[in-house]
Each structure stands twice: as C-alpha cells, then as structure tokens.
Amino acid sequence: MSIFQSSACAFFLARDLRYLILLKLLVTLSPLWCALWVLWRLRWGGGSIGKGLRLDNSGRAADAERCYRRALARPWLSASKRAELLRCLGGVLMGLGRYEESRKCLDEALAMGDPMGGCRASIAELLLLEGIDAERALEMVDQAIEASTTGLGESTSKERVSRDLASIIRASLLGLRAWALALAGRQDEAQKAIVEALQLTIKPSADLLRNYYGFALLTRMSRANTCWLAGMAFLAMKKPDKASECFKKGSDVDPKGKYGTLCRKQLALVG
C-alpha cells in the first residue's frame, strides 16, 4: 500500500481554493464562461490531478498512475502543470514502492520549480521511507515549511477558511518534520513537533466544508496522515505505545481512505 503524499495533495487543493472561488464567480456571471473554464481545466491537465488524488486515496494507485501518465502525455502542458503532475505521479510511485522511479519524477519536478514546497516535502518523505539521510530530509522539510508559508501569503491571515486550510497543511508538514527529527536522534524537538502537529488537526470551519467541494476529503486525509506521521516518529523514538495511540486515531478518522489503511497496517505490526 502506498505511503503518504498529503503534502502534495494539500498544496494542490490549497492552490485550487482560488480556482473554486473563481468558478463560483463565473457561474454567477455566465454559465457559458463557466463551461469554457471547466473545459480548459480538464483539457490541460487540471482535472487529472484531482481525479488521480481521489483514485489514490481510494486504494486504486495503479489507476492513479495511469491517470497522471495520460495527462503528462498531453501536448502544450505548461511547465507548472507538468511539475504538479510529475510530483503527484512521484507520490503514487512512492506508495507503490517504486522508489527509483519516484525519485526521477520528483527530481524533474523540483528542477521545474517548487513554489509551495510540496515537491521538497515528497522528497523528504522518500528519504525517510528509505531510512537514509535524515538530516537532508529535515532540511527539505524545513524548506517546504518556509515555501508553503510564503506561497500561501496574505490569504492565510485574513479569512477563517484560509487559516483552517493553512493549519491543515502545516500539520502534515510538522508531522513529517517530527519523523525526520526522530530519525536524526533529536527526540525533544521531535516530541515538540508532534504535539504542535496534532494540535493543528482541528475540526475545520463549517464554511470550509460547506462551500468548497473536496476540502472535507482533504481534511480527513490530512488528519489521518498527520496521525500516521506522528506514529512513525514515535516508532523511531522507540515508543510503540504512543505510536499505537496515533495509529488508532488515524484509522478512526479515515477508516476507508489510504491513510487510515496505513494506520491499521502499522497497528497490526506494532501489535
């Protein structure tokens, strides 16, 4: 079963917040313009990212891989769209255990730009899964946190919805940072990052769930993923009881999704 790519998912959906707001405006102004905009998004790969995300989260990683590869084969993809698709494909391949292929996709995506840090977060995850170079993984996570803070910009400070979204993204990144710190032997810092990450797995505002399709899925995935990351950090610190608590919580949050399944598998291994 694949491992987490919540950072990439979160960054995709975070960016799409402004697209959803635009879509609501277009519906108000003109159904024709709305239809043309949706067609443009689907034609140039935007719809493939969301579709691939849903397929991957439902346990259909092979179908998600095909979805992303079809989108990458389309002509006239912009550099930013290609980078997004490569990052998502890299995450799926990582989950399938095809680490070398994943690394190639992520390296290519990173070379094309990573304005919100999702690619660096995925590379950090890959390093941690392989159990190599925890310090480099930590460096990548810290860069991703800085990039995500800059990328979200002022929108995260003015609206309740945006603040909730920023918390969802930061929780996953802090969970990843805790795992890197734990593997690097910095247990006190790892413990602090775990506490902060779990505190950020808040219940989102009603506006976030009511007005923006897909964010309920993001919230559920991100909360379960953060619990999984915290559990992995506790395992690295030789604290299986604490790890089991996190895995149990993640399984309860997202019982049918990818990250809930990962949590249950870890629970079985921990015993």
Image: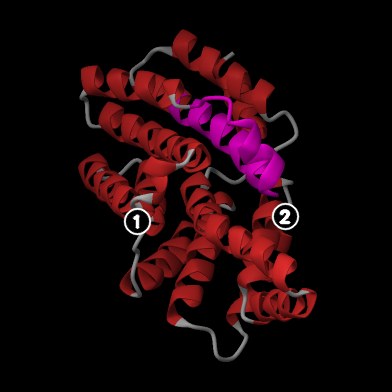
Query: Which corner quadrant of the image does residue 41 belong to?
Result: bottom right
- Picture coordinates of residue 61, whole percent (x, y): 68, 55
- Picture coordinates of residue 64, whole percent (x, y): 68, 61
Which range is magenta?
Answer: 201-230
In the picture provided, is 21 more to the left or to the right than 113?
A: right
- The quadrant of the rendering that contains the C terminus is top right
- Specify the label residue 24 is tagged with: none
Coloring scheme of the render? secondary structure
First of labels 1, 2 by sequence position: 2
Query: Given this view, does label 1 or label 2 mark the residue nearer the observer?
Result: 1
- Picture coordinates of residue 95, whole percent (x, y): 56, 50
In the picture provided, is 68 more to the left or to the right than 155?
A: right
Q: What is the secondary structure assignment of the residue under circle 2?
A: helix
Q: Is 202 colored magenta in this rendering?
A: yes
- Specify the label residue 55 is tagged with: 2
- What amino acid is labelled 2 in the image? Leu
Of all residues shown, which one is farthest toward the top?
Answer: 241
- What amino acid is labelled 1 in the image? Gly
Mark 1 = which residue? 151
